[in-house]
Amino acid sequence: MLKVALKSFSFKNKTVLKNISFSLKRNQNMTILGENGAGKSTLAKIVCGLYKTKKTVFIDDLYLENLSFEKRAMKLNYIPAKLEVYDEFLRVKEFLRLSLVKGDLKSAVALSGFDKRDGEFCKDLSSGEAQMLLLASSIAHNADITIFDEPVSNLDPKRVKRVFEMLKSDLLLQKIVITHNLHFAYKLGYSILFIKDSRGEFYENCDDFFEKENLLRLFGKSVVKKDDFVVMEL
């Protein structure tokens, strides 16, 4: 079980988040939504311990700060929105090997789409290819909880569908997804944490968030639900 009770978090003397509280049962997935700058990525980094807090994140009967680095790696993994490689000679297969914690390297290579191109340098990948490599690394890591930050940014429709299928599969135990794509979030069907004005509103049931009246309250007339689609009204 994952529990988060964040009273306040400031960055560069500015309060970024306050009164964020939610609880996820084992195997329960969640999507984090909110406008640009709402603090979604900041929250993800707090949950993973990349930003230090005390008695905020509680996972499997222990506070995050009381877990060893090895235990933390087993339980949590954060997949950033952009691949950053500091060794220009690092190859695809080497990157995935470095990501290996308790997952399967063969499955990770297959997901990346580089089965026959695993000798390529990471720095030579397109933005979409780099995004797929990051997602593949999550399979190699195979943490109990994997947090994906904008996993479908820079992806063409075919790859978006592949990512959707991966997130809906049993390849990973528990997923938290940050996205701006409301239709993608709706189709995932995960519980929703919506962040606005630094505060979070948790929806256990995805359908409750996507009720037409709730969308109107949160987004005004910029977003509408039509039949089984959530679209931006232009």
Image (cartoon, rainbow, N blue to C red):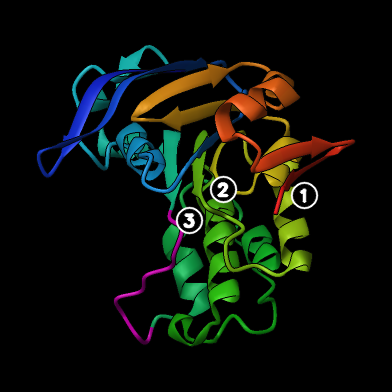
Q: Earlier in the sequence, mark 1 or mark 3?
A: 3
Question: What mark, if any, has residue 180 been given in the picture?
Answer: 2
Please give the name of the residue rendered at 35% of the width and 85% of the height, measured from the top-left corner: 88
Q: Residues within 10 Å of mark 2 (few under 14, many from 20)?
A: some
Residue type at numbered disc 2: His
Q: Which residue is mark 3?
A: 100
Rounded to the nearest angstrom, the CA distance separating label 3 from label 2 is 29 Å
Q: Residues within 10 Å of mark 1 (few under 14, many from 20)?
A: few
Please give the name of the residue rendered at 60% of the width and 73% of the height, measured from the top-left corner: 128
Residue 52 appears left or right of 143? left
Q: Are marks 2 and 1 in contact (CB under 8 Å)?
A: no
**Residue nearest the observer in this picture, 212 or 26:** 212
Q: Residues within 10 Å of mark 3 (few under 14, many from 20)?
A: some
Q: Which residue is mark 1?
A: 165
Magenta stretch holds residue 106: no
Q: Main secondary structure of the magenta part?
A: loop
Magenta stretch bounds: 80-89
**Residue nearest the observer in this picture, 48 or 75:** 48
Q: Secondary structure at mark 3?
A: loop
- On screen, residue 81 above or below 225: below
Rounded to the nearest angstrom, the CA distance separating label 2 from label 1 is 18 Å
Residue 175 appears left or right of 63? right
**Residue nearest the observer in this picture, 181 or 189:** 181
Q: Secondary structure at mark 1?
A: helix
Q: Position of residue 171 (x, y in %)?
A: 69, 44
**Residue nearest the observer in this picture, 13 or 133:** 13
